[in-house]
Image (cartoon, rainbow, N blue to C red):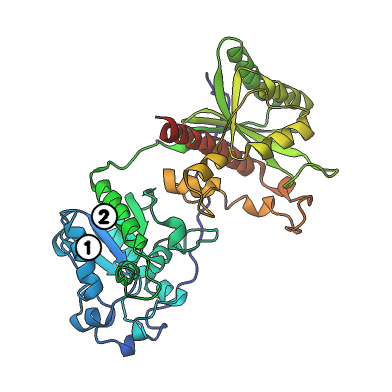
C-alpha cells in the first residue's frame, strides 16, 4: 500500500537543554577524600562499561574502583561469566569522590559528576553499559528522562538499546546492596536479591554478543496530511484491502481530554500504522473523514491494536459512533502481563526500553494536559498545539504501538 501522498516529518523531538549541572566541587565532597575525582579504570577489552554508586573507604585509599569487599564480590560474580573486571571492563562511579560514611550520594552530587560520566561514555564508546544502582541510573538518565525516573527496582532487568550512546544499557542492583543481602545473619537480608542479580548479570553479559538493532530512520516512516481528500483516499484503500484479506492496524487518538463524556470533548487527530515501518496521521475535523474512519474501525477484517484499547474504543464510540469490529491487542495490558511492576506499562517507557527512543513528545505534551489534572472531564489545550507537530507525534504513537504489539506477540506466543 502506498502512502506516497503524505508529507514526511521529523520524528525526533526538538533539542532540549539539559537540567542545570552544578560545577565540580559544589558538592563539597572533595575535601573529605583521599582520592578526589577518582579516575576511571580498566583496559576495556570487551567494551563493557560499569557505572557504580560511589567509592568506598578502601577504594578511596587505593584510588581505584571496586577494591573493597564489594569489589571482590563483584569480581567473583564477573569471573563466573569469564569477565575480568580490570582487563575486560571500564569502571567509573556516578559520584567519584567518596561520600562521608559511605552514604548514598545525593541527586545534586550525581548531577555534579554527570559530565565526567558522559565524557567517559563518549570517549570509550562501550558496547554494553551496566547501571549498577539508583545513583548510576540517575547519572545516565536523570537529565534525559522527562517523566518520573523512579528507582532501580523499576528499571532493573531491561536490556535497553540506547540510541544516543549506541550501546546496550542494562540497569541492575548495586553490588553493595546485593553483597549486604548475601549475609543471612544480617537482619532484614534477602537472599532472593542475589538470585535476581545473578540472572540479570548473565543477561547483561550475553548482550556483548548481541548486535545493536537498527530499526531504520523513523523520519522516513511518518507521514501526515491535513487534506481531507487524501485522508479519504487512504481510508478507502484500507477498506478495499479489507474486502480481500484480514490485517491489523494500530491506531491512536489525540483527544481533548482523558474522558469523552462531558459536553465539548472531541478527537483532534488519528494516527494509523499497519506495519513496523509506516504510520500516518491526520486531523479529524471533517465529517466525511470521521464517517470513513468509523467504517475502518468497525470492519470485521481489520483487527484493531491500541495502547489502552478501552480508552481509544470509548472515544471512538462517543465521538465517531463507532464500535471496534475486531479488537485484537492491547499493548498496555500485554505490558502488564509481561512485567507487572509499577510505572513500566506506559507507551513512552516501553518505546525507550525496547526501541531506544527516549523522547518524541516534549514539543506537544504541554498541550495535552489540562489545568485541572484531577478532573477527568476537563478539556486540555490540544487545539493550541502546532498541528504538524501534533500529527507527527500522533503518527509515532501509532507506529510504536504497532511495533510494541508485534514484539509482545512474538514474546508471548513464539
Residue depicted at 34% across the width and 63% down the height = 191
Residue depicted at 40% across the width and 77% down the height = 105
Which quadrant would residue 327 be assigned to in this image? Answer: top right
Q: Does residue 170 appear left or right of residue 247 in this picture? A: left
Looking at the image, tell me whether mark 2 or mark 1 is earlier in sequence order. Answer: 1
Residue depicted at 68% across the width and 40% down the height = 311
The quadrant of the picture occupied by the C terminus is top left
Which is nearer the eye, 214 or 49? 49
- 251 vs 340: above or below: above
Which is nearer the eye, 197 or 34? 197
Which is nearer the eye, 413 or 312? 413
Q: How many marks?
A: 2
- Name the spot of residue 360 as percent of width and height, x first: 53, 47
The secondary structure type at the circle numbered 1 is strand
Residue contact between numbered discs 2 and 1, judged by CB atoms under 8 Å = yes
Mark 2, other Cα within 10 Å: few <14 / some 14–19 / many ≥20? many
Q: Does residue 389 appear left or right of residue 82 in this picture? A: right
Query: How far is disc 2 from disc 1 in space, using C-alphas?
Result: 9 Å
- 10 vs 56: above or below: above
Mark 1, other Cα within 10 Å: few <14 / some 14–19 / many ≥20? many
Can residue 77 be seen by looking at this rendering? yes
Disc marking residue 126: 2
- Residue lying at the far front of the rendered structure: 185
Q: Does residue 184 appear left or right of residue 139 in this picture? A: left
- Name the spot of residue 366 as percent of width and height, x first: 65, 55
Can residue 229 be seen by looking at this rendering? no
User: What residue would you read off at disc 1?
Assistant: 90
- Name the spot of residue 12 as percent of width and height, x first: 49, 46
- Residue lying at the far bottom of the rendered structure: 31
- Name the spot of residue 300 as percent of width and height, x first: 64, 18
Amino acid at each position: 500500500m502506498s502512502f506516497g501522498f503524505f508529507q514526511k516529518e521529523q520524528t525526533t523531538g526538538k533539542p532540549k537543554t539539559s537540567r542545570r549541572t552544578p560545577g565540580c566541587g559544589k558538592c563539597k565532597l572533595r575535601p573529605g577524600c583521599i582520592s578526589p575525582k577518582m579516575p576511571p579504570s580498566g583496559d576495556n577489552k570487551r567494551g563493557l562499561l560499569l557505572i557504580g554508586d560511589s567509592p568506598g573507604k578502601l577504594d578511596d585509599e587505593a584510588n581505584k574502583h571496586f577494591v573493597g569487599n564489594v569489589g571482590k564480590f563483584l569480581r567473583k560474580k564477573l569471573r563466573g561469566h569469564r569477565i575480568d573486571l580490570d582487563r575486560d571492563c571500564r569502571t567509573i562511579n556516578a559520584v567519584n569522590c567518596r561520600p562521608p560514611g559511605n552514604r548514598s550520594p545525593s541527586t545534586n552530587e550525581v548531577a555534579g559528576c554527570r559530565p565526567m560520566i558522559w565524557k567517559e561514555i563518549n570517549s570509550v564508546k562501550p558496547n554494553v553499559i551496566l547501571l549498577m544502582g539508583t545513583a548510576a541510573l540517575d547519572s545516565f538518565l536523570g537529565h534525559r528522562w522527562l517523566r518520573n525516573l523512579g528507582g532501580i527496582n523499576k528499571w532493573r532487568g531491561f536490556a535497553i538499546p540506547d540510541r544516543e550512546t549506541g550501546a546496550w544499557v542494562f540497569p541492575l542492583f548495586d553490588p553493595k546492596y546485593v553483597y549486604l543481602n548475601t549475609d543471612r545473619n544480617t537482619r532484614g537480608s534477602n537472599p532472593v536479591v542475589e538470585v535476581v542479580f545473578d540472572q540479570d548479570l548473565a543477561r547483561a553479559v550475553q548482550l556483548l554478543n548481541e548486535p545493536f538493532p537498527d530499526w531504520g530512520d523513523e523520519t522516513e516512516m511518518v507521514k501526515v496530511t491535513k487534506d481531507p481528500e487524501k485522508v479519504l483516499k487512504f481510508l478507502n484503500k484500507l477498506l478495499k484491502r479489507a474486502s480481500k484479506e484480514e490485517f491489523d492496524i494500530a491506531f491512536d487518538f489525540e483527544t481533548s481530554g482523558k474522558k469523552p463524556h462531558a459536553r465539548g470533548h472531541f478527537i483532534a487527530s488519528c494516527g494509523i500504522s499497519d506495519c513496523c515501518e509506516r504510520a500516518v496521521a491526520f486531523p479529524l475535523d471533517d465529517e466525511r473523514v470521521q464517517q470513513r474512519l468509523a467504517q475502518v474501525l468497525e470492519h470485521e477484517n481489520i483487527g484493531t491494536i491500541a495502547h489502552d484499547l478501552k480508552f481509544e474504543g470509548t472515544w471512538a464510540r462517543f465521538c465517531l459512533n463507532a464500535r471496534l469490529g475486531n479488537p485484537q491487542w492491547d499493548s498496555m495490558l500485554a505490558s502488564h502481563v509481561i512485567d507487572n511492576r509499577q510505572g513500566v506499562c506506559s507507551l513512552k517507557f516501553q518505546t525507550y526500553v525496547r526501541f531506544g527512543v527516549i523522547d518524541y513528545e516534549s514539543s506537544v505534551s504541554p498541550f495535552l494536559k489540562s489545568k485541572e489534572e484531577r478532573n477527568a472531564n476537563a478539556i486540555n489545550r490540544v487545539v493550541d498545539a502546532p498541528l504538524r507537530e501534533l500529527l507527527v507525534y500522533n503518527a509515532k504513537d501509532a507506529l510504536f504501538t504497532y511495533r510494541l504489539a508485534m514484539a509482545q506477540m512474538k514474546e508471548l506466543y513464539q
